[in-house]
Image (cartoon, grey):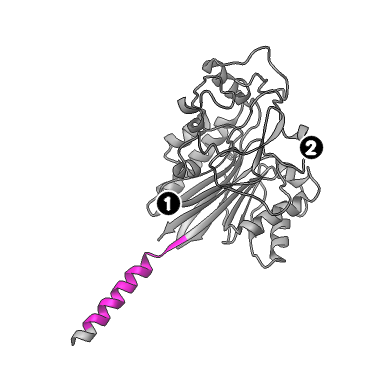
Amino acid sequence: MNKYSIVLLALVSLLSVSCSKKAADLKVLQLNVWMQATMLPNAAQGVIDIIDQTDPDVVFLCELNAGTEPPFTNYLAEELRSRGKNYYADTHHAGNGILSKYELVNDPEPNLNLTYAVKSSIKVNNRTVVLYSAHLDAGNYAAYLTRGYSPSAWSVQLETPVTDTDSIQKYSRLSKRNEGIEAVIADAKAEISQGHIVLIGGDFNEPSHLDWQADTKDLRDHRGVTFDWEVSTMLQQAGYIDSYRSLYPDAVTHPAITWPAGNKDAKLERLYYAPKADEQDRIDFIYYYPQAGVSVADACIVGPKATINHGQMVTDDTQDNILEPTGVWSSDHKGNLVTLVINK
């Protein structure tokens, strides 16, 4: 064997190793579509437009209506196909749906305990990625207590704000949010044990504990309260990572407010529930389980650069990266757009 053959073999070997380690990007969009895009003129078109604009590989959708024919996810897939973009559509479950450029595979025997989420899986870079699109219980929204509003009777002002954390926890636990996320975490354990990648995205109807600590206690009418909201805490304890906070850990400079969205095309009174308070929070998320070879490359908020504060629409004054829609914004929430890197 001459020296040229040796060099050639070395190059082939390096190329082989390089190809075997080639990474794939997976772009994931999460949206609450506000009563299946029925609350605004041309809202359904707005959902199609933002998917077309962001060009995600996977879309987590929530607030879908049961019994719609064709199912809203199928309608979106068909409309996007007319624009040259091919998506598979998952069947609706519990008001949630999934679109994917990769073929969706459902469990042969669905887990009936997933009452607040829909589950499917895809293959990316020869790895199984399990997807959960969730919409947790909206009842007893205890984040309104420090704002001086009822957690269950929308827009009803209390005599005085509630800042006792035991009371906040008590009211929050009257909802089914904990049970909803516990079911997802329990179902995903078997997937994780097989080395599968797990993504959980949706409207959790609850802030993150990462956004209610000492650095934010005097912001957004938290009124000095620090509180470990339980849904995000349970996810963190189970090993999941908040994709946005993994890149932007500072909740002061990057609050990433998703609720309420300042939607110029909606009636203002439909966008707030605490008109005499600052009710801004981040309640929409994309979480992932950190299996080997998985990382976050990019994350941004999707929606208008405006929110609602004391019943008025205000321009966002943060360092958050916000991708604005070119068309109608269909929701009273903002969404998340995250790019993950998946190695073989």
Nearer the N terminus, badge 1 or badge 2? 2
The residue pinned by badge 1 equals 295
Check if residue 167 falls in the magenta segment. no
Check if residue 7 falls in the magenta segment. yes
Quarter occupied by the N terminus: bottom left
Q: Nearer the viewer, residue 50 or 196?
A: 50
The residue pinned by badge 2 equals 267
Query: Where is residue 313 shown, x and y percent of the image?
Result: 70, 35
Helix or strand or loop: what does disc 1 sit on?
Answer: strand
Magenta-colored span: 6-24
Q: Which of 52 and 127 is in front in this view?
A: 52
Residue 33 badge: none
Task: Say whether residue 71 is visible.
Answer: no
Q: Are there few (<14), some (14-19), or many (20+) residues within 10 Å of tag 1?
A: some
Query: Where is residue 334 shown, x and y percent of the image?
Result: 64, 43
Residue, x 64% and y 54% (percent of image)?
90
Q: Which residue lies furthest to the top in this view?
A: 159
